[in-house]
Image (cartoon, rainbow, N blue to C red):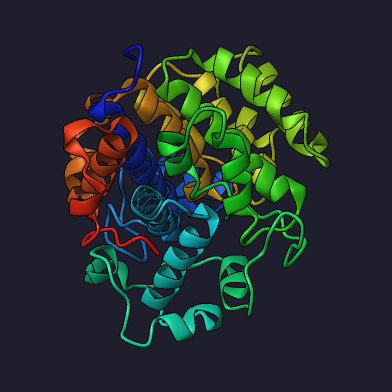
Amino acid sequence: MPASADVTHFRGCLLGGAVGDALGAPVEFMTLEQIRGRFGRLGVTGLEGGTCPAGSITDDTQMTLFTAEGLLRAQVRGALKGIVHPPSVVDHAYARWLHTQGEHSPRWAKWNTDGYDGWLVGLQELHVRRAPGRTCLSALNAERAGTLERPLNDSKGCGGVMRIAPVGLLAPRDRAFSLGVEIASLTHGHASGHLAAGFLASVIAALRDGDQLDTALDGATEELEGYDGCEETRIAVSAARRLAHTGAASPEQVERLGGGWVGEEALAIGLYAVLATRSFAEAVVLGANHGGDSDSTAAIAGSLAGIIYGEGAIPPDWLGTLELRDAISRVAEDLHRATHGGSGWDPEREWDRYPGW
């Protein structure tokens, strides 16, 4: 990985997360025994069909894309208007995602009387329901957004952490953790639901800036310990790091960390899958093959492995099968341009694609 992540590593992060999502989706809700019964001793090792065609993404990647869009629109607004509250702009992006699911946010209704703008919501491939999480749907249908100070619920499901990678790609290093927490808090009120998201965002930001993974984990752990309610996430991360140095990597080891249904477990499994392997493919396969929330854990592993190894490390046949590959790449490239600024990013020219609200 270069000293500072180039565009191929930005694409690797978002495409890697989407590939992990697509690889894990057909085995979500299956036990490890059932996975091996269907796919053989090694479990699922490629993009397989199920209820959807091979390579299909789920709500994990859909929401990741709208997280990125919200962040980019906030960036444009801040540059041109001088004032912006990024979590609110991301919340509006989630209202557009909710629209693609056939539902409508009451708190944004009066602002969207002329319809929903931006290019992402116009992609018809996103207007499909891929088992969206009930917590996210319920929170986005509420009259107000959740905040750290005024949570909407006590959910610590993994729906906050699985969508947060773009925060780590775009946010300043010293803001990534707190912004990840704020954005996850829009929907997930339990500390382990939003602190896991902040942790992952911090790690990705550090990797983006050239840190080694262990250094990134140390820094995120230090930030984590400044938050109330951090104990579950701290214990889960410590368990993942310790387990990565204990015996050979295996699905049985993964299952010692839980099922990944909740934030701290999904984070721990994604971290373990990368720490215990030496390639992109190994990481996402390990992250998917367990009895639990396989698409989310493999997506987290894929995001981390993707920024570490880069797009070139993702098997070409997986990329060739991946749904919305071009759109995901485009969003990653826009995040890279916005992060690095310069002549490639002009907020005035970007307003039509990323209107700042």
Q: Residue at x 71, y 22 (%)?
A: 222
In this view, 139 is above or below 259: below
**Number of disc labels:** 0
Quadrant for the C terminus in the image? bottom left
Depth order, front residue of 342/97: 342
- Residue 291: x, y in percent? 59, 46
For residue 317, what is the image quadrant? top left
Give 325 or 322, whichever is nearer the viewer: 325
Q: Position of residue 56 (x, y in %)?
A: 30, 57
Q: Quadrant of the N terminus?
A: top left
> Which residue is the extreme one toward the front?
82
Residue 121 visible (yes or no): yes
Q: Residue at x 46, y 86 (%)?
A: 110
Please name the residue shown 30% across and 39% down the image. 338
- Residue 68 position within the rendered picture, expressed as x and y whole percent measured from the top left: 38, 50
- 59 or 47: nearer the viewer: 59
Residue 233 position in % (x across, y down) = 73, 36
Against 271, is 24 above or below?
below
